[in-house]
Amino acid sequence: MKIAVIGSGYVGLVAGACFADTGNDVACVDIDEKKIENLKNGILPIYEPGLSDLIERNTQSERLKFTTNLKESVENSGWFSRFESCTFCCQRNRATYELSKNHC
């Protein structure tokens, strides 16, 4: 399954890593370019036991990636196909509004 997780904070990052570890292709999206660059370099914004291992394993296997490109991530998740795809919005307010305005 292809999954887009919008928001790479505590909820989104942990959820994305867990989804990837179960064999899904996951794109974690965030508007914070510095956060995404740090995640790509293995620098985590939070501490959760075992999370760094999950992220390292799944980025190396290319099941987990980090991006600031919301439109591409949602389109690649198969948002419109309804089958074997999913988009999770782990942000409140703006990202939820933009997703419903532009993609639903």
Image: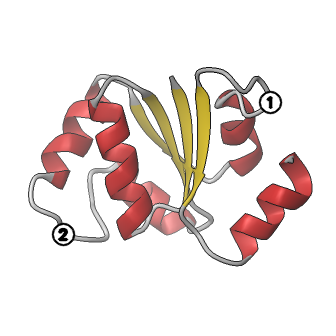
Residue carrying label 2: 47
Answer left or right for 71 relative to 87.
right
Give the residue at x 56% y 68%. Answer: 32
Where 77 falls versus 69 (above or below)? above
- Colour scheme of the rendered structure: secondary structure
Is 40 left or right of 103, judged from the image as shown?
A: left
Circle nearer the viewer, 2 or 1: 1
Q: Residue furthest right?
A: 101
Q: Are marks 2 and 1 in contact (CB under 8 Å)?
A: no
For residue 67, side relative to residue 104 (left or right): left
- Residue behind mark 1: 80
Q: Quadrant of residue 92?
A: bottom right
Task: Say above or below: 83 vs 98.
Answer: above
Q: Is residue 26 above or below residue 103?
A: above
> Residues under labels 2 and 1: Cα distance?
34 Å
Quarter assignment of residue 20: top left
Q: Residue at x 62, y 53 (%)?
A: 68
Classify 20 as above or below 43.
above
Which residue corresponds to the image point at 72% horizontal and 66% vertical from the top-left? 96
Please name the amino acid that badge 2 sits on.
Tyr
